[in-house]
Image (cartoon, rainbow, N blue to C red):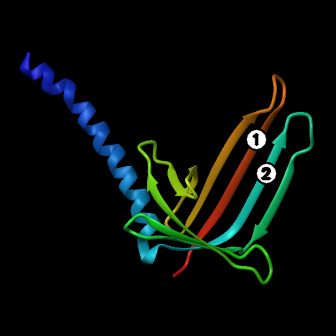
Amino acid sequence: MKLFNRIAILPVIILLLASCSKQSQLENNLTRQCGRWNIDNYKLTIATTGLPTETLEYGDCGYMYFFENLDGQWIDLKEPDVTYFTEFNWSITDENKLLIEYNNEDFLFDFTVNEKDRQVILNQEVIQLNDTTFVTTSIEYELLRIE
């Protein structure tokens, strides 16, 4: 009976270690080399049921910094001659997603690309306006490591 309990617990322990290591890998990759990333591409897409999809896209439009203490900074350069500076907190969730918190709001991003020097993160939200109308907002950042 004791042997069976140990065998039954082993897969659970392995699963927990694997998920923790994935979280650590994501966290370490974001913070490596001082956590400096260029926002190579920013894309905002708004899709409303029955209407044409609207897309707004900017290239080379700022920087994101991810620090080991889970603080971060976002420097937004989308508008000419205007710089927006935002501080945020971040973490990697149990589901291996990037959670960014600022202005009392949480933004959950999926890693659609997770490479050593390139990350693509996607936040998608769906709002139902009525029985047949939905609005889907997608925000995608392509980040390239600054060396």
Amino acid at the residue labelled 2: Thr
Q: Are marks 2 and 1 in contact (CB under 8 Å)?
A: yes
Q: Residue at x 78, y 68 (%)?
A: 58
Farthest residue to the right: give it. Answer: 51
* Residue located 47% across and 65% down the image: 30
Q: Residues within 10 Å of mark 1 (few under 14, many from 20)?
A: some
Which comes sooner in the sequence, label 2 or label 1?
2
Element at label 1: strand
Count the numbered circles shown.
Answer: 2
Residue 21 percent coordinates (x, y) = 33, 51
Residue visible at 72% across and 63% down in the picture? 42
User: From the viewer's perspective, is residue 134 above or below residue 103?
Assistant: above
Query: Residue 127's image quarter?
Result: top right
Separation of disc 2 and disc 1 at Cα?
8 Å
Mark 1 lies on residue? 136
Which quarter of the rendered picture does the N terminus lie within?
Answer: top left
Q: Is residue 3 left or right of residue 36?
A: left
Kind of residue at badge 1: Thr
What residue is at 43 percent from the left and 69 percent from the top?
31
* Label 2: which secondary element: strand
* Camera-nearest residue between 56 and 16: 56
- In the image, 132 versus 119, the foreground residue is 132
Residue 70 place in picture, x, y as percent: 41, 63
| Depth order, front residue of 9/63 | 63
Q: Which residue is mark 2?
A: 45
For residue 97, side relative to residue 11 (left or right) = right
Residue 131 placed where, x, y %?
Answer: 81, 22
In the picture, measured across the screen, residue 57 lies left or right of residue 84, that is: right
